[in-house]
Structures are given as C-alpha cells and as structure tokens.
Image (cartoon, rainbow, N blue to C red):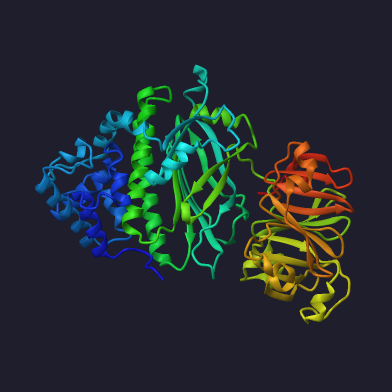
Amino acid sequence: MPKSHTTSAERLDNLRATLSGARADTRASRRMRLSRGSNLLTGVLLHAAARLDEDLELTDLEQRLVNSLRRVLPDEEIAAWGREYKEQVAARGSVDLFPAAIADLPVKTGFALADLVAAVPGLAEEILAQPNVAVIDVSQPPGPDGYDTQEFTTAQAEYGTAVTILTGPPLPQELRAAPIPARLRLSRFRCERQATDSIFNPANEIYWVTSAGSDTGAKTTYDSGVFNDIYTGSQRTFDGDAYLFNGSVRHNLTWHIQCWEQDDSDTAFYRDLRKGLEDIAEYCIDAAVQLTEDGDDDAEGGAGLGALIALAAALLAWLVGLITNQDDMVRERTYGMDKRALYALLNQPGREDWWSFDGGANGRHKLWIQWAATKGGQVHAAVRRNATHTYLFHGDQVVKYNTSTERLDQGPLPISDAFRALRGTPFARPTTAVELPKIPAPWVTKGLITDTGTADDRICLFSGADCLIYRIDSNRIEAGPLPMSQLFPAAKLWIFAFVPEAVCRINNDEVYLFWGEHYRRYNQANDTIGGETSIAAGWPGLAAASVPPHVIAAVQKDAGRYYFFQGTRYVRYRASGEAVEAKHSILDGWPGLKNTDW
C-alpha cells in the first residue's frame, strides 16, 4: 500500500526541483507556471519560512501561515523549506514562479496582511483571466450541465483548484448598506463516478469539510463525518444542521469546500492537514473583509475579492500536492458571493444548485447547496407502522407521527433512546429503513429468524451495505447486523454497484430499492430482483409534475399510493394513473413537524 503522505526528504527534494525548474514537466511545476500572480501566497509562505530560519519576528500574515503549516510539519522542516528558498534566490536572483511583490522582497523585510491587501488589486486582472476562475450571475438559471462550463471543469484539473464568484442584478441604494441574515446548507450529494482504489474494496468513504465567513465577522465551519459505502450512483443526504454558513452578511461572503475520500491513510495526519488548510482559508476570509470593506459596488474591491480567493485556493492546492503522496482529496473549491447574489437567491426559498467536485481517478461527486435554508422539514427515512402511525427519521432522531391527528405521539427523540438496543451502533443513524410486516420464507429457511409471525413492530434498518431486523415493542435486535446480501441474496451480484438510499414497501412480499436516479423492485418471498430502471421512466408522473427524479425517503400511504420525500419537500404519488396527487413543503404536509428542529 502506498504511503499516505510524503517524507520530509521527499518534500524538500520536490520543493527544490520545483523552485529550480529541474522538474518543469511535473504536475506541480506545470500548475505553478500557469500564473505567477496566483502564486503570491505560496511565495509569502516560503518567505516566512526563510524568516523563521533566521529567527526574525514574523508578521501577522506570516505567523498565521507558519502556524497552519505547523499542524503537520515540525519547525525544523519548515525552516529547511526557508533555507532552500533562500538558496534558490541567491543562485538565481529571484524565483520566477512568484510575482515581484514577494520575489523581490529581501528576507529581512516581512510581508504583512496590509501588504497582501495592497498587492492584490494589481494582480486581479491576470488572476481573474484564468480559466479556473468563473463569475456567475445566479439570477440566470443554470444549464442542463449546471453552471460549470466544460472549459472550467477542464481547468479545475489543470490548475488543481477552482474559484467561483457569484453575483446578481444591481441592488437599490436602500438595500446596499444594511447587513442581511443568510443561511446556506449542504443538502445532499451524489457519486457520479466512484474512485477505483482497489477491485477488492470498491466502496468509497466520502466526507466533506467546509469553512465560511462574511464581512460582519460571522464564521461557520462544518465537518460531515464519513459517509460509508459510496458507489457510483449513491446519493446521501446531509443532516439538517449541515450549515455551510449561518450568520449575517454586509457585502460579501466567502467559503471553501473540500471533498475527501477516506482510505487506510494516516487519519490523524489528514485531520491535522485539513485543519491547517481550514486555518489558511479562514485567515484569507479576514483579508477579504478588509479588501472589500468599501462596499459591494466597488469594482476594484470586487475584483480584488475574486483574486484573493484564487490566491488562497492556489496555496491550498500547492500544499496538498507537496505534502500528500496519494491525493485523497477528491477536489476542493472556493467561492465568493456578494449581496446581489444573496438577494437573488433568498427570494427563491428552497432553491438548490449543484456543483461538481471532479477528482478524475479519485471520483466525481455532485454537491447540492440550499441557498435559503429553512429550519424544519427534513426526513431521511420513513417507516409505516400502521394505518395511523408512521416513524420519520432525521439524522440521529426519530418521531412517531400520527397521520390521523397530524401530531407527534412521540419525539423527537434520539434514535438510541427510542430504540435502545441500537446504542453504540451505526444504526443509531440509519441510512434508510423499511417495515417488515411478514418474514420472507428464505430468511426462515436459513435460520436468520425463527419467529415467523406477522407483526407491525418489525422494521429493517440499513447502515450503508449492512442491515438488521429490529422489534420495536420489545426493543431488541432480532437479527443482524448482517451484510445486505444475506437478507437480500439476489443483491449479491450487484451489491458492489450501489447501496439503496431509500427502501419502500409495496406489499407484504415486495419492496422498491431506490438509489440515485434509479430503482429496482425486489421480491423477498422468492428472492428475485427486477432490472435497473430510471425513476423518471418508472414513475412518469414525477416528470409531468416537474418533480426531480430522486428519492431521499419513501413510504407507502396505502395500497398503490406513496409518499416520496425530497429535501424540504414531498409528493404523494398514485401508481394507478401515474400521477402526483399533491406536492408540498414537508412542514405544510406534515404540520406536526413544525415545532421541531428538523
């Protein structure tokens, strides 16, 4: 197995080769030679390392960059980087990878935050002309392939990073000065192409890390935790508190998103590296505040904001490439947004847009961001207990919903309190669930379950590719945890292709298995499975009602009618006639949830 990160000697050798031009054909060298201006912060970091080596007092900016690097590297190595940088400058007069603002600066002279703010406007034209930097008017709808053009997507791989600036129509004078509240939330993601680490362990483990800040000083960070068993076509929903940003904005908001694929790497090392990268991104947010303090209609300040964001992104990409040996970061992207974009999006509650995180061989994922995030109405799994009661799951919480009175008979409660036998297991945060009114005969034959009676308290809970059978009334695990292929044997030929995101009961013997934009029909009584069908083709009434073809949670209302949950909305679907009978926000259709934090 390859090492999770490079050694100190390898890093120094790679740095020397990059600075001297000895390996101009390497990916890192090619990226740095695409734009000198974009390398300003990288040059500042090496300049700071040189000053650290000479025991000089560091400036505010230099100290922050060095402290971030200290999370993963010792002072001795950082100082060695500085000596190498000084030697290259002494031998060559300056390093031509960096702009004059830092390349011509003597080591005895520090480079402060104020110097960065002063230097950025002069570099803005060069940086913003790069193909990996895009300015988007969000008042214009995205195309079928989203906002990212093919040129931009190609440039992401070439430059190792991407910068997107979101704007909108001009604002009336009276709306420009006062801060406004903003709440952006990660909604869901879908794996478009999984990474191929090994044919013996094809599943990916994906997690997301974000940091955001505005010019009011409000900051938000988020770490999703690991989503296990991710295959091509897998779709996962974030918890309701997955806020990309939750605060106020005066003129500008910036954020940074990293998508990682976890394998057997040094987990502690990568955690420290991510934290160091977050520190750098956060400090650049502070610089953006100072740079744009004159307002969102200041053209020079707006261009400077975009340039500064690109500088931070270039530094982050360079550090990941230098320090890591196997690039477990799928892709990182940096965004800036002005108040004009915020107003355009806040006027469309519930709007979500997706963005591509394409890491080539490391996988490709679509991430949906909800711009005007509302509190309440998120359902991740649903189980019908009987004609009047349905269990609704949200992250690690559950409610018992009375559909006749439209009230909660129980909850919200932690799942581990409502179903005590699940404490300490991953099933206390299930990926999906389905009721089991009747035990399939093959399960009895195999001895998986001995009680063959019909019951309304038996449910099947899923955690990725594993599942178990739970008895609600007696609060016990009746069978499992087991690999899904043991309870759904016909799945063994395709279990590596997907893990269901939603399971819905059809009758006592059959269920629908949904994942991504597809589904299959599974007969548990005779262990047979239908072919893969697109949701759009199998449920044509969704498209006719302009409902997206994805299902986050599903439950049968009664024979032939189903509830499909999608983010903050749901539809009631009638199979006879293939029609959407109703579509509402979840809070309007399930009013008992209005006083919850869902």
Q: Which is nearer the eye, 91 or 492? A: 492
Which quadrant of the figure contains the N terminus?
bottom left
Residue 596 position, x and y percent, is 69, 49
Vertical placement of 494 versus 340: above or below?
Answer: below
Rendered residue at 67%/46% (across/down):
567
Residue 157 position, x and y percent, is 42, 46
Residue 22 visible to an observer of this rendering:
yes
Vertical placement of 479 versus 270: above or below?
Answer: below
Horizontal arrangement in the rendering, residue 233 relative to residue 474 (left or right): left
Please state the total of marks drawn on the protein image: 0
Rendered residue at 38%/44% (across/down):
158
Image quadrant assignment for residue 129? top left
Image quadrant assignment for residue 6? bottom left
Horizontal arrangement in the rendering, residue 109 relative to residue 505 (left or right): left
Q: Which is nearer the eye, 277 or 176? A: 277
Q: Which is nearer the eye, 144 or 414? A: 144
Residue 49 position, x and y percent, is 20, 52
Q: Which is nearer the eye, 176 or 69? A: 69
Residue 206 position, x and y percent, is 53, 58
Rendered residue at 40%/55% (across/down):
274
Residue 286 visible to an observer of this rendering:
no
Vertical placement of 109 versus 387: above or below?
Answer: above
Vertical placement of 335 versus 482: above or below?
Answer: above
Horizontal arrangement in the rendering, residue 490 relative to residue 196 (left or right): right
